[in-house]
Image (cartoon, grey):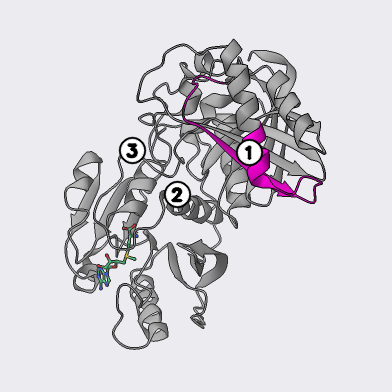
Amino acid sequence: MNAAPHPFEFFIVCPIGFEEIQHQELITTASELNLNVLESKKLKGGIEVQTNDRHFVTIIPYLKVATRVLLRLTSFKVRDFPKLYNKVKKFNWGPYLYRADQIDILVTLRKSRLIHSGRAKDSIEKAIGEWLKGNPRKKISDSAAIQKIYFHIEEDLCQVSIDLCGSPLYQRENKNQGAIAPIRENLASGLIQWTLSKLNIDQASTSTEPEKKLTFIDPMCGSGTFIFEAARLKTPNTNKNLSAHYIPATKVEFQKVCQNTSRNIFSEFIGIDQNQFFSDKRLELENVSFISKSYKKVIQDLPKNAVFVFNPPYGKRIKIIGERVDFYQNVIGDMASMDAKAIGMIVPDEVPLKIKMNNYQQEVLRFKNGGLAVKFILLIKNEPAT
Ligand SMILES: C[S@@+](CC[C@H](N)C(=O)[O-])C[C@H]1O[C@@H](n2cnc3c(N)ncnc32)[C@H](O)[C@@H]1O
């Protein structure tokens, strides 16, 4: 490990409600990649990380729950606009700015003497513009990610962070087109990781082969987001054009990213849907089958002891015949009849679903899916004591 003289501070932004899952992903992945974390703290909507490891940025393509990762640059007291302008103009942006155009300044104010975020943004833009006049940037590729700089001013303390990502991390470059109500990729990955943690499956194992035969099934897979995320859980997203590739302070370390460290937790994957959205996409993945039918027609032929994770229709964009409670109850009963090892299903939070099954333990995780309050109901089969 290559230690830096002062610790770096990062902030990993994740969906609200997924902080514990994100924290677990950070700790597991850092240990797998041999990255040293000095301290990590869960905050609402993200994890603050202190590290003295220069290579910490190489974790980014492995973080599947995160929305983006920020590097904290500096903080200073500020109570008026001239001070803000001067502080920003005098800061040494050299290690961080790789472009002179397409710089997105994002300002948030809280309990501060400065109460006008638009004016604060103007002062910051002018100050950076002045700095750039004396420090022109080298020409970079047209496809380089835009730069985002965050200024959060709370109780007169301005915290400045730079985004290491560009486009949000949940936008995978291999995204499916044309699905109805697809789940966001980072939510899907987080729910699979949560399911594995409740099954006590070691996600930090270093073996490149799945430990046991474990089938992952999405019986209503739509465009196959859950299957894709389950199959690529331990595969880094290397085809994203991240800001960290270009930022002078991170680009050298970032070039070392992604040796071939991918491995599988599941041994096979089955996607089922009446729609055809997943039909071609699955060909990009190994050990994936797709059945284009109602799951009801094939349930009896599915492997026993599998992990089912899915996002059924909510009865809004995709209609449900009959009462929603009955529909969901029925689906769970079908999975349980196949002796499922785990059944994880997202339903609208307002649906008063009461599940009682003697041989399953129940856990619930609440979050927002596309702005709608939902719950992920997870049933874990009681295993006989060995
Ligand atoms: C909310 S969408 C799932 C979206 C998916 N998670 C994704 O990311 O693209 C619900 C899906 O359930 C499918 N569906 C509904 N009833 C089904 C059934 N009985 N068998 C198989 N698929 C079904 C619909 O065709 C639809 O694609």
Q: Nearer the viewer, mark 1 or mark 2?
A: 1
Dot 1, crowdedness within 10 Å: few (<14), some or many (≥20)? many
Residue 207 on the magenta segment: no
SS for callout 3 = loop
Q: Nearer the viewer, residue 14 or 192?
A: 14
Quadrant hosting ligand 1: bottom left
Mark 2 CB lies closer than 8 A to ligand 1: no
In the rendered image of this protein, does residue 63 appear above or below residue 37? below
Q: Which residue is mark 1?
A: 121
On the rendered structure, is 110 left or right of 245?
right
> Label 3 is placed on what type of residue?
Glu
- The span picked out in magenta is 97-123
Question: Which residue is pictured at 74% across the width and 32% down the height?
Answer: 84
SS for callout 2 = helix
> Label 2 is placed on what type of residue?
Ser
CA gap, disc 1 and disc 3: 31 Å
In the rendered image of this protein, does residue 332 appear above or below residue 101? below
Can the viewer see residue 35 in this picture?
no
Can the viewer see residue 214 in this picture?
yes
> Label 1 is placed on what type of residue?
Lys
CA gap, disc 1 and disc 2: 35 Å
Question: Which residue is pictured at 55% across the width and 70% down the height?
Answer: 362
Q: Which residue is mark 3?
A: 173
